[in-house]
Amino acid sequence: MYSLLENFIKSRTSIDYACLELICSHFEPLKTKRNELLLNFSDVCQHYYFVNKGCIRLYTINKDGTEATRFFAFEGGFGTALPSLIDQTPAGEYMQTIEKSELLKISRDKFYHLVDTVPQFAFIYRQILELGFITAQKRIYGFQGFDALEKVKWVIQHQPDFLLRVSNKMAASYLGLSPSTLSRVKAKL
């Protein structure tokens, strides 16, 4: 249950077995159903999740009822509503598993305890933050000048399994396209 998390950690930092065990001992297994909400719009986020199997999606719903997806976490990745987790304010977004999933969750308190007491974990947290920031910047600024075909090619290059795993509606909301436009573009590839 913890081997994927262990491999994630070992691939990013030098760490001894005892320290690795300590980190893993703070995570609890959680199995979810398809489309299960992990966080409601007005809730304050209290957990960080590592995806062993499945997928986490973060999204909002505008006043017209249209969903806008901002992030997906697949196997071997972390996912949370980070602004809410850090600031302890209402999330302002939803977090759900879009597939039957197997997660490892860690409470906010335990997470920050590890960040404060285990230098290797603090290093990994910094890497996660930096990579998340860079990816978000590339997506935001890249998408501003991209047409529909370029957006789809970008997501294929950076997240090859994305279009195979995510519904057309969710993928379109992530890419800022209508589902029909996404279908037309995919047919051209």
Image (cartoon, rainbow, N blue to C red):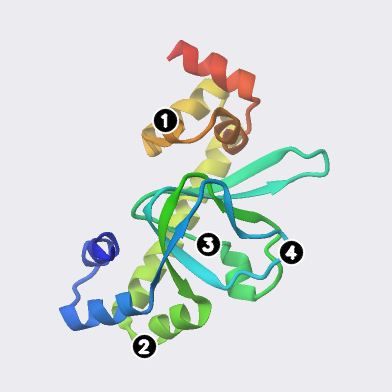
Residue 19 percent location from the top left of the image? 23, 82
Amino acid bearing label 4: Ser
- Residue shown at 45%/78% (left/top)? 111
Q: Earlier in the sequence, mark 4 or mark 3?
A: 4
Residue topped by disc 2: 117
Q: Residue 164 — which label?
A: 1
Amino acid bearing label 3: Thr
Residue topped by disc 4: 42
Nearest the viewer among 111 and 116 is: 111
Q: Is residue 83 left or right of residue 151?
A: right
Residue topped by disc 3: 80
In the rendered view, tell whether residue 24 sits above or below residue 30. below
Q: Is label 3 in contact with label 2 (beta carbons under 8 Å)?
A: no
In the rendered view, tell whether residue 68 sits above or below residue 89. above
Mark 2 element type = helix
What quarter of the picture does the N terminus occupy?
bottom left
Q: Is residue 179 left or right of residue 31?
A: right
Instruction: Single out the residue that lies furthest toward the left.
Output: 16
Task: Please rate how many residues cluster around mark 4, counting C-alpha atoms within 10 Å: few if below 14, some from 14 to 19, many from 20.
Answer: few
Instruction: Single out the residue that lies furthest toward the right.
Output: 63
Q: CA distance from mark 4 to mark 2?
A: 31 Å
Q: CA distance from mark 3 to mark 2?
A: 21 Å
Amino acid bearing label 2: Thr
- Residue shown at 61%/66% (left/top)? 83
Mark 4 element type = loop
Nearest the viewer among 122 and 35 is: 35
Q: Is label 4 in contact with label 3 (beta carbons under 8 Å)?
A: no
Q: What is the quadrant of residue 84 in the picture?
A: bottom right
Which label lies toward us, 4 or 2?
4
Q: What is the quadrant of residue 126 in the picture?
A: bottom left
Q: Earlier in the sequence, mark 2 or mark 1?
A: 2
In the rendered view, tell whether residue 181 sits above or below residue 129. above
